[in-house]
Amino acid sequence: MTEEQLNKLIDHQFAKFYGLIDRRLDEVRNELRTEIATVRDRVDSLHGAVDSLAAQVENASIDNHARDAQIDRHEQAITRLADHAGLRI
């Protein structure tokens, strides 16, 4: 085998090897894209759930403050009525 033939064989083998590596990298890249898309969907879903929970907590907080204010008004009214009636609470 001549040096030229050996070089052609090496070039051919290297090209084959490079082709295999390139195809495998494409496969891995596509798998990663699929996995990343799945993770993004899950993160979006979790983000939506957290937003929903945050809104519920905010609404509950507003409701609690309104309830507390109403209880305070009722307590004040009861105290005034008790004082007016001469009752001690």
Image (tube, rainbow, N blue to C red):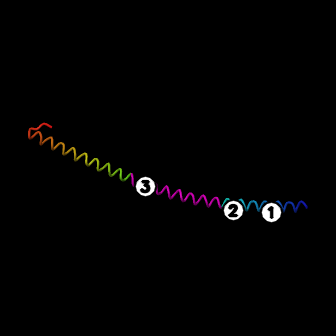
Three-letter amino acid code at the position of disc 3: Ala
Residue at image mark 1: 12
* Separation of marks 1 and 2 at Cα, in angstroms: 17 Å
Q: Nearer the viewer, residue 68 or 88?
A: 88
Q: Is residue 57 shown left or right of residue 5? A: left
Location of residue 33 (image quadrant): bottom right
87 vs 51: above or below: above
Label 1: which secondary element:
helix
Label 2: which secondary element:
helix
Mark closer to the chain start, 3 or 1 = 1
Q: Residues within 10 Å of mark 2 (few under 14, many from 20)?
A: few
Q: Residues within 10 Å of mark 3 (few under 14, many from 20)?
A: few
Please report the residue visible at 56 percent of the width from the left and 57 percent of the height from the top.
36
25 vs 69: above or below: below
The image shows residue 48 at horizontal and vertical percentages of 43, 56
The image shows residue 42 at horizontal and vertical percentages of 50, 57
Q: Which residues are magenta?
A: 27-53
Residue at image mark 3: 49
Q: Residues within 10 Å of mark 1 (few under 14, many from 20)?
A: few
Q: Main secondary structure of the magenta part?
A: helix
Location of residue 82 (image quadrant): top left
Three-letter amino acid code at the position of disc 2: Arg
Please report the residue visible at 76 percent of the width from the left and 60 percent of the height from the top.
17
Mark closer to the chain start, 1 or 2 = 1
The image shows residue 28 at horizontal and vertical percentages of 64, 58
Question: Which mark identifies residue 23?
Answer: 2
Which quadrant holds the N terminus? bottom right
